[in-house]
Image (tube, grey):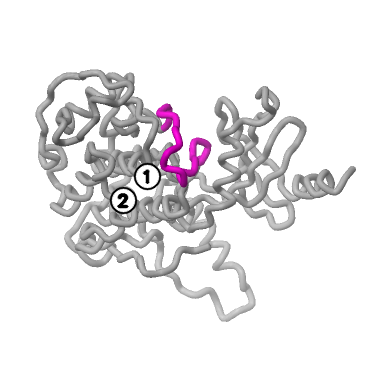
């Protein structure tokens, strides 16, 4: 056994797979733990033996970009090892995603909560874009939630760098409901604006509690988009009729966002509208979004630890708190802690919205490495 094989065998022994928690076409995800400490992890086993070149490009991309991107709002890659014909990615364990939160009808969202999730999404995305990485598959179930409430961008299997602006890229990326119209029209040259459109769709979904633009096919996706936002003109989006896959879809009037998002503030609608501009070059950037008045007006973003939690998250939090309380049995007694707020079926109040629950995120702090 050579040095590389020995190192791989040592890494493999460090981690234990406990149970399968998900399976896709090319990968199986397990809940696992670190053998020495018992720390929970997720182990993504990618089946590489079936590919003619030996390794799926999505696996290569995921390893490449996660090793490069260390940020509190991007999922952490802890280790990589191979076994037989499989590549195993060891990731921090996050058992909840934003889609689960949105679909849990027992949870009530405050405007401050949505603002917090959006702030963390833009922070993670700004870090990716600053490092010349496009995510290209942003959607609620790829935004994972940690036990402390931090939101983290995950699943970088479709990510790629965009340092060379003249390089052709595929338009067959981003899950359809979150795919911008330039990709639906076959654009091969694009940049960070494609991710911003996806974030706009997620923003709308958080307010509606249902997908904003759920098309049944690529053509229906365009129709659904134009029905919601109006058919673009050459004035709105110069040159879009020259895109490779352009086809006329029909004429739909522009409907003000206010008609659907009746409870949203002017700042909310302004930021949403800037994410969903047809002309990609005019869409707001992630960096600009973080300085938008939306994030600095009342209510301030909820502190991540105060965000709504699913029943399973609440149970896990209680277990963690009990474990902390029982650490020092010989001391003067456990410190008295305020119980975590139970946000299940909770009613909104003016105090919640304006003061007591809302906590401002500190955007001035450097990104965690």
Whether the magenta-drawn stretch holds residue 157 is answered as: yes
**What is the quadrant of residue 246 in the picture?**
top left
Instruction: Judge whether residue 96 can be spotted in this image.
Output: no
Residue placed under numbered mark 2 in the picture: 285
State if disc 2 and disc 1 touch (CB < 8 Å): yes
> Is 167 on the left-hand or right-hand side of 180?
right
**Residue at 44 percent of width and 29 percent of height:** 170
Of residue 124 and residue 23, the one placed in the foreground of this image is 124
Q: Residue at x 85, y 49 (%)?
A: 3
Sequence-earlier tag: 1 or 2: 1
The correct choice, above or below, for 261 with respect to 69 in the image is above
> Could you tell me how far apart the alpha carbons at marks 1 and 2 are, in whole angstroms?
7 Å
Residue 355 in view: yes
On the image, the x and y values in percent for residue 118 come to 32, 51
Tell me if mark 2 has few (under 14), some (14-19) or many (20+) residues whose alpha carbon lies within 10 angstroms of its own: some
Q: What element carries label 1?
A: loop
- Decide if residue 239 is on the left or right side of residue 183: left
256 left or right, relative to 81: left
Residue at left offset 70%, top offset 57% = 37
Q: Where is residue 34 in the image (x, y as percent from the top left)?
A: 69, 52
User: Where are the magenta residues, as a range?
Assistant: 155-173
On residue 192, which mark appears? 1
Q: Where is residue 315 in the image (x, y as percent from the top left)?
A: 48, 51
Element class at badge 2: loop
């Amino acid at each position: 056994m050579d040095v590389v094989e020995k190192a791989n065998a040592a890494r493999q022994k460090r981690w234990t797979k406990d149970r399968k928690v998900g399976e896709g076409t090319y990968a199986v995800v397990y809940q696992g733990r670190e053998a020495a400490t018992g720390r929970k992890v997720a182990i993504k086993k990618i089946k590489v033996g079936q590919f003619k070149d030996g390794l799926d490009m999505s696996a290569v991309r995921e390893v490449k970009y996660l090793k490069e991107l260390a940020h509190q709002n991007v999922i952490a890659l802890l280790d990589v090892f191979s076994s037989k014909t499989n590549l195993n990615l060891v990731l921090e364990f996050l058992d909840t995603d934003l889609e689960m939160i949105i679909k849990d009808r027992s949870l009530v969202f405050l405007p401050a909560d949505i603002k917090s999730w959006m702030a963390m999404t833009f922070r993670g995305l700004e870090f990716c874009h600053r490092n010349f990485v496009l995510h290209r598959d942003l959607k609620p179930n790829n935004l994972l939630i940690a036990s402390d409430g931090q939101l983290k961008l995950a699943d970088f299997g479709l990510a790629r760098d965009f340092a060379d602006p003249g390089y052709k890229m595929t338009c067959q990326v981003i899950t359809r409901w979150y795919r911008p119209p330039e990709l639906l029209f076959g654009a091969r040259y694009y940049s960070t604006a494609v991710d911003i459109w996806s974030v706009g769709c997620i923003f709308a979904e958080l307010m509606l509690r249902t997908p904003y633009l759920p098309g049944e096919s690529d053509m229906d996706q365009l129709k659904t988009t134009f029905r919601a936002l109006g058919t673009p003109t050459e004035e709105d989006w110069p040159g879009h009729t020259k895109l490779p896959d352009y086809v006329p879809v029909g004429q739909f009037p522009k409907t003000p966002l206010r008609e659907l998002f009746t409870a949203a503030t002017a700042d909310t609608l302004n930021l949403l509208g800037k994410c969903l501009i047809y002309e990609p070059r005019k869409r707001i950037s992630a960096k600009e979004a973080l300085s938008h008045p939306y994030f600095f007006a009342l209510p301030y973003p909820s502190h991540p630890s105060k965000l709504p939690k699913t029943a399973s998250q609440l149970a896990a939090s209680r277990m963690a708190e009990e474990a902390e309380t029982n650490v020092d049995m010989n001391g003067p007694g456990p410190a008295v802690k305020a119980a975590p707020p139970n946000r299940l079926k909770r009613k909104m109040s003016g105090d919640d919205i304006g003061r007591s629950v809302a906590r401002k995120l500190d955007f001035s702090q450097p990104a965690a490495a």
